[in-house]
Image (cartoon, rainbow, N blue to C red):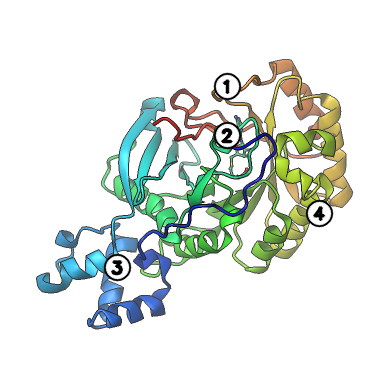
Amino acid sequence: MPRPGELTLVPARRGKPPRHLADLDVPDRRQAVAELGEKPFRADQLSRHYFARYVSDPREMTDVPASVRDALATEMLPTLATPVRHLETDGGDTRKTLWRLFDGALVESVLMRYRGDRPRVTLCVSSQAGCGMNCPFCATGQQGLTRNMSAAEIVEQVVVAERMLSRGEVAGGPGRVTNVVFMGMGEPLANYRAVLTAVHRLVEPAPAGLGIGRRGVTVSTVGLVPAIDKLAAEGLGVTLALSLHAPDDELRDELVPINTRWKVGEALDAAYRYYQTTGRRVSIEYALIRDINDHAWRGDLLGRLLNQRGRGWVHVNPIPLNPTPGSKWTASRPEAQAAFVAALEERGIPVTIRDTRGSDIDGACGQLATVGD
Ligand code: SAH
């Protein structure tokens, strides 16, 4: 376990997961298949099975000759993650999956189905096993960083969710993943390369990738400023979420230890630049912690800092604190939460309280931890 405030940007363990089709772009897939002595078009067949039918079982690939199916699947579609268990709540509309990776590392993803007039399915994915950012109110942060995930390991979480949805195995009948949020375990921008490749695979249309709408993809970060600028320059059109949690450096140094490297002002400037470059409205995440950061004056200060940079570029997502093991902190009182929201709204900032979906199965924000599983 990390010491308080200790940051881990580079994992100690670097065991590499097996290479998978989803790690490669289309030309590299063809080349990889050719290197296996097969016709390059087989790569396109495999891609369609994986990204359009969500199939990696060679027995289901009847258009590939039986004699080469197994070899191709072993090389190009190796098993990356095995589901250990699924936990469900909300009548099956929220479903958390625990995965074991090739080396025994454990990660989780959470599927959330929303019904009603704006039906959607959001998958919250992990990008690292554990996390090195050490935020004291987050269960993942307390377990430390095990390793980075590969692009294909990240994508596999989405493909398996698509498979379950397409086969009608999720409550509510057949469906598709409409949103992917990098809000599971890990700091996505500390695993930049793999996350970027994964985003490409998510948004590219089949058979290159899954064809999920760019606007449906959100990358959440503690505020790694150079990586935010890099992401903006990629021209991807995905949404950025910044985990701020305090508008003042004194408190944020404690709540989000990366603040000792990049201050509130620098993180907000980077978020604003992201908006300017991409035109995508940025989300500010703010876990409301009773008597720690939920004062109306902090809401007001946050509103002022956001307005100093511009109007209409940002909205705030307060998150009622979800309980985590060993934490002395709890969620704000309803009156305090209301006053915090009102302070922001008085400054014209749009505010949406995030729901606490999955908190009863430890599947809500900040509750994903695989120590002791
Ligand atoms: N490392 C990235 C991705 C994780 S997203 C990031 O920090 O942005 C998970 C979100 O849930 C982050 O905003 C995180 O700060 C927040 N969170 C962590 N622990 C929480 C808790 N106990 N209750 C509510 N939100 C929490």
User: Is the residue under label 1 in contact with that under label 2 (CB below 8 Å)?
Assistant: yes
**Quarter of image, res 174:** top left
Q: In the image, what residue type sits under mark 1?
A: Gly
User: Is the residue under label 3 in contact with that under label 2 (CB below 8 Å)?
Assistant: no
Instruction: Determine crowd level at label 1: few under 14, some 14-19, many 20+ residues with C-alpha closer than 10 A.
Output: few
Residue designated by label 2 = 142
Of residues 214 and 142, which is closer to you in this image? 142
- Closer to the chain start, of discs 4 and 3, is 3
Dot 1 falls on a residue whose secondary structure is loop
- Closer to the chain start, of discs 1 and 3, is 3
Q: In the image, what residue type sits under mark 3?
A: Met
Mark nearer the viewer, 2 or 4: 2
Q: Is residue 135 left or right of residue 246?
A: left
Q: Can you give x and y, in whole percent of width and height, for residue 250 in the image?
A: 84, 35
Instruction: Determine crowd level at label 2: few under 14, some 14-19, many 20+ residues with C-alpha closer than 10 A.
Output: many
User: Is the residue under label 4 in contact with that under label 2 (CB below 8 Å)?
Assistant: no
Instruction: Determine crowd level at label 4: few under 14, some 14-19, many 20+ residues with C-alpha closer than 10 A.
Output: some
Q: CA distance from mark 4 to mark 3?
A: 42 Å
**Quarter of image, res 210:** bottom left
- Closer to the chain start, of discs 2 and 1, is 2
Residue designated by label 1 = 326
Q: In the image, what residue type sits under mark 4?
A: Asp
User: Is the residue under label 1 in contact with that under label 4 (CB below 8 Å)?
Assistant: no
Query: In this view, which residue lies farthest toward the left?
Result: 67
